[in-house]
Image (cartoon, rainbow, N blue to C red):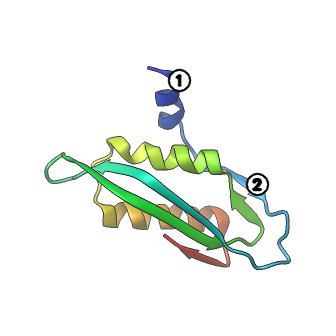
Amino acid sequence: MKYGEKEIKDAKLETWENPTPERDYTIDITFPEFSCLCPRSGYPDYATIRVKYIPDMKVVELKSLKLYLNSYREKYISHEESTNRIYRDLNDLLKPRMLEV
């Protein structure tokens, strides 16, 4: 297993302290290389995932988010389910003031 494959396999979301929790500001991240496997056909499905949130006390560490999103590449999961799972995982981890996926 190559080192990048190992990092993706072991991916977990990490946080940093929000440097300015007293201010409402928007973090907007676009990930145009999202892929997963169709649970019906097994064909690869591609999408752009956009995460937009207003942080409270924590922000997501960007490299961990990229690795986490890449971990879907080998999962048989629909875009609807993956979107809702990403939303749940980020919401549970960050408890942001606002979140859109």
Going by the numbered disc 2, the residue's amino acid type is: Trp
Q: Residue at x 18, y 46 (%)?
A: 42
- Residue 76, percent from left and from top: 27, 49
**Distance of mark 2 from mark 1, alpha carbons?**
24 Å
> What residue is shown with label 2?
16
Q: Identify the amino acid type marked 1.
A: Tyr
Q: Regarding mark 2 in the picture, which secondary structure is present there?
A: strand
90 lies above or below 16:
below
Identify which residue, 12 or 33, lies in the foreground. Answer: 33
- Secondary-structure class at tag 1: helix
Q: Which circle's residue, 2 or 1, is located before the other in the chain?
A: 1
Residue lying at 61% horizontally and 46% vertically, measured from the top left = 64
Position of 17 with respect to 74 (left or right) is right
Which one is in front, 96 or 100? 100
Relative to 67, residue 2 above or below = above
> Relative to residue 80, is residue 29 drawn left or right?
right
Q: Residues within 10 Å of mark 1 (few under 14, many from 20)?
A: few
Q: Which residue is mark 1?
A: 3
Which residue is at a point 71% across and 71% down the rendered structure image? 55
Which residue appears at 39% of the width and 47% of the height? 72
Q: Position of residue 73 (x, y in %)?
A: 36, 43
User: Which image quarter: residue 29?
Assistant: bottom right
> How far from the left and from the top, in percent, is residue 67?
53, 43
